[in-house]
Structure formats: C-alpha cells, structure tokens
Image: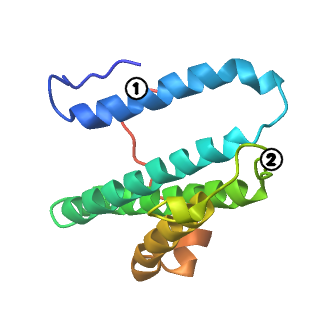
Amino acid sequence: MTSAIPVGDAYPYLRAASAGIRHHARTLAPRTQHPTSATDRAHLDVLHAHLTALHQLLDLLAETARPPHPAAGRQLATAHTRLWQATAAVHDAFHLLPVADATGTECHPERLPEGPPVLTICQRHLAAGHVVRRKTTPADFNSPPSGRTTTCAQ
C-alpha cells in the first residue's frame, strides 16, 4: 500500500506500529487452519492495547481538527466511535476465549506489578470507557456513518 503523501521521517512510530501489525497478521495467517489456542488471549490483549492507544490518538486528532475543519472533525469523531465499538468487541472476545492450562502456565498475580493479565485488559478498557462516556451519546453508537465525502477513486 503506497501513499500519495510523502512520508519521509514524519510519524515514524505510527509507521512502525502499522508495520508491526502487518507483520503479525502475516505470521498468524498459516495458523488459521489450526484450532484456537490459549495464546490467542495474549494476541487479543496486545491488540486491545493497540486499539485503545489508537482510540486516544483519534480522540486528540478529532479535537484538534474540529475547530478549523468541522466536517473533518465530525468524520474523525465518527471514526472514534466506531473504533471504540471494535475495541469493545475485542475485549469481549478476550473474555470468551478459554484460559490457558494450569500445567506450567499458571498465572501468579503476586509476581506481576500490574496484576493478572485478565485484570490489566479490563483496567485499560474501563479507563478508555470513561473517555467514551464523556464524549459519546448512545445515539452516536446507533447512527450509521454519515456524510461520507471522499475524493478517492473507488
């Protein structure tokens, strides 16, 4: 996927994060033939962390774009809402997957400064949820994406 905008050294961490996700997707592709394993919970935890960070970034972009460019700000706010829905679905999927066997992979929460992994994802999700509740109404979640004004050839 190439961009018409020259990238140069702008936003190297975002480009690295995108490259990391593409790499991870390629390495998981052959595993889709095998049954779901307990390690998928770890994948969903990391993906949830990425989505919540992206959610925060999108929130900041929407806030800075809104005053000078209201239409762009509304589109980013809609993306913010849809991204939260995806984040919530990943969180729910995490809890629906089976927990790893207790044979050799026991969780020792007393050894983890941040607590057991199942609580870490929930804490992260609750923190992100506070932002969503402050800025989003229930009607925003039920409304279809509107005002699609794109200039890209489809």
134 and 110: which is toward the camera? 110
Q: Amino acid at mark 1?
A: Ala
Measure the alpha-carbon separation of dots 1 and 2.
Answer: 32 Å
Residue displayed at 31% across by 30% down: 15
According to the picture, the residue beneath numbered tag 1 turns out to be: 19
In the rendering, at what x and y percent does residue 123 appear?
51, 70
**How many C-alpha atoms fall within 10 Å of the one at disc 1: few (<14), some, or many (≥20)?**
few
In the rendering, at what x and y percent does residue 35 appear?
85, 32
Residue displayed at 73% across by 43% down: 104
- Residue 136 horizontal side relative to residue 110, left or right: left
**Residue 137 appears in the picture as rendered:** yes
- Residue 95 horizontal side relative to residue 22, left or right: right
134 w.r.t. 8: above or below: below
- Residue 129 horizontal side relative to residue 68, left or right: right
- Residue 104 horizontal side relative to residue 1, left or right: right
In the rendering, at what x and y percent does residue 19 appear?
40, 26
**How many C-alpha atoms fall within 10 Å of the one at disc 2: few (<14), some, or many (≥20)?**
few
According to the picture, the residue beneath numbered tag 2 turns out to be: 101
